């Protein structure tokens, strides 16, 4: 349970950091980065809820 919680919060933190580092998120490549960032966040959230 602790490992999953750490995974969830590390994924959330990493997602926030990546979004902040994107700067102008409206370019095409950065939209793709934003998509994968949010995808990784929701994947971690799903793992957290599945325990």
Image (spheres, rainbow, N blue to C red):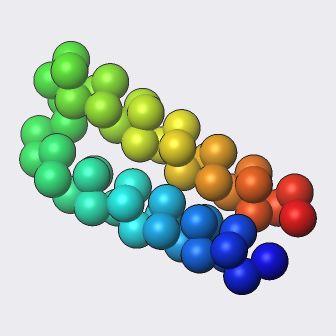
Looking at the image, the residue that sits furthest to the bottom is: 2
In percent of width and height, residue 23 lies at 11, 47
Q: In this view, does 31 lie to the left or right of 44?
A: left
User: Which residue is drawn at the image coordinates 32% and 24% (left, top)?
Assistant: 32
Q: Quadrant of the C terminus?
A: bottom right
Residue situated in front as seen by the camera: 28 or 7: 7
Q: Across the whole image, how many numbered discs are drawn on residues?
A: 0
Q: In this view, does 2 lie to the left or right of 19?
A: right
In percent of width and height, residue 9 lies at 54, 72
Looking at the image, the residue that sits furthest to the right is: 51
Determine the image quadrant of residue 49.
bottom right
User: Which residue is drawn at the image coordinates 43% and 33% (left, top)?
Assistant: 36
In percent of width and height, residue 14 lies at 37, 60
User: Which residue is drawn at the image coordinates 54% and 38% (left, top)?
Assistant: 39
Q: Quadrant of the N terminus?
A: bottom right
Looking at the image, the residue that sits furthest to the left is: 23
Q: Is residue 40 left or right of residue 42?
A: left
Looking at the image, the residue that sits furthest to the top is: 28
Q: From this view, report whether residue 49 is shown above or below residue 22.
A: below
In percent of width and height, residue 31 lies at 29, 27
Residue situated in front as seen by the camera: 30 or 1: 1
Q: From this view, report whether residue 2 is shown above or below residue 14.
A: below
């Amino acid at each position: 349970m602790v490992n999953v919680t750490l995974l969830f919060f590390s994924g959330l933190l990493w997602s926030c950091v990546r979004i902040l580092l994107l700067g102008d998120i409206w370019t095409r490549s950065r939209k793709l980065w934003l998509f994968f960032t949010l995808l990784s966040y929701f994947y971690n959230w799903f793992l957290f809820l599945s325990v």
